[in-house]
Image (tube, rainbow, N blue to C red):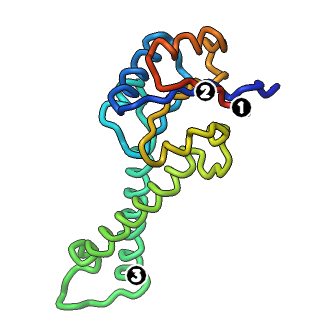
Amino acid sequence: MKTPPVYGLMAEFNTPEDLVSASGRAREEGYTRMEMYSAFPIDGLTEALGFPLTRLPLLVLFGGVLGGVGGFLMQYYAAAQSYPLNIASLPLNTWPAFFPVTSELTILFAGLTAVIAMLALNGLAKPKHPVFNVPKFERETRDGFFLCIESTDPKFEAVETRRFLETLQPIAVYNVEN
């Protein structure tokens, strides 16, 4: 596949509210391939974009269940199968004794699954991204709010997209070179 000459068009906004409003308008206009950049999380931004639900919670649940079942079975095997001890005539597979390790392994596996799945699903780590080619983008880490519509969007046309972004009243609109 041929790489487009530009990555997209980026608009800079003054406030988080302007960015949320612009993102919602871009979605209403039919743009689907866009990214927002801000130094901090903004309430309502994901709703304005209509982000689909992620698979991460399901993966974390699976990791937690796997850790819990694995922890229980490991203790059951050790206490009832491999090295059974009759202590005070209690059953060999008494589950209350297994609870601390089972709960700790549930939390450990869920946490590890969350970190690994998050990194995999986000496509990290990308030290070089085309948006870093925009000189004003360094403001993003302090007080900048940016909306980038990618050139891979089916509706993207350089002139029409620039005209649309300018109707959103940004500070400026920049070309994002590849």
Residue placed at 28% from the left, 80% from the top?
A: 92
Q: Which mark identifies residue 177?
A: 1
Residue placed at 37% from the left, 25% from the top?
A: 18
Q: Which mark identifies residue 174?
A: 2
Q: Position of residue 99 (x, y in %)?
A: 26, 72
Residue placed at 68% from the left, 47% from the top?
A: 128
Q: Nearer the viewer, residue 100 or 9?
A: 9
On the image, which quarter does residue 50 sit in? top left
Marks 2 and 1: CB-CB under 8 Å? no
Residue type indicated by callout 1: Glu
Q: Nearer the viewer, residue 134 or 69?
A: 134
**Secondary structure under the numbered disc 1 in the rendered image:** strand
Q: Nearer the viewer, residue 67 or 113?
A: 113
Residue type indicated by callout 2: Tyr
Q: Position of residue 89 (x, y in %)?
A: 18, 87
| Residue position for label 3 | 78
Q: Residues within 10 Å of mark 3 (few under 14, many from 20)?
A: some
Residue placed at 76% from the left, 24% from the top?
A: 4
The nearer-to-camera label among 2 and 1 is 2
Residue type indicated by callout 3: Ala
Q: What distance separates the C-alpha of mark 2 from that of mark 3?
A: 64 Å
Q: Position of residue 134 (x, y in %)?
A: 63, 37
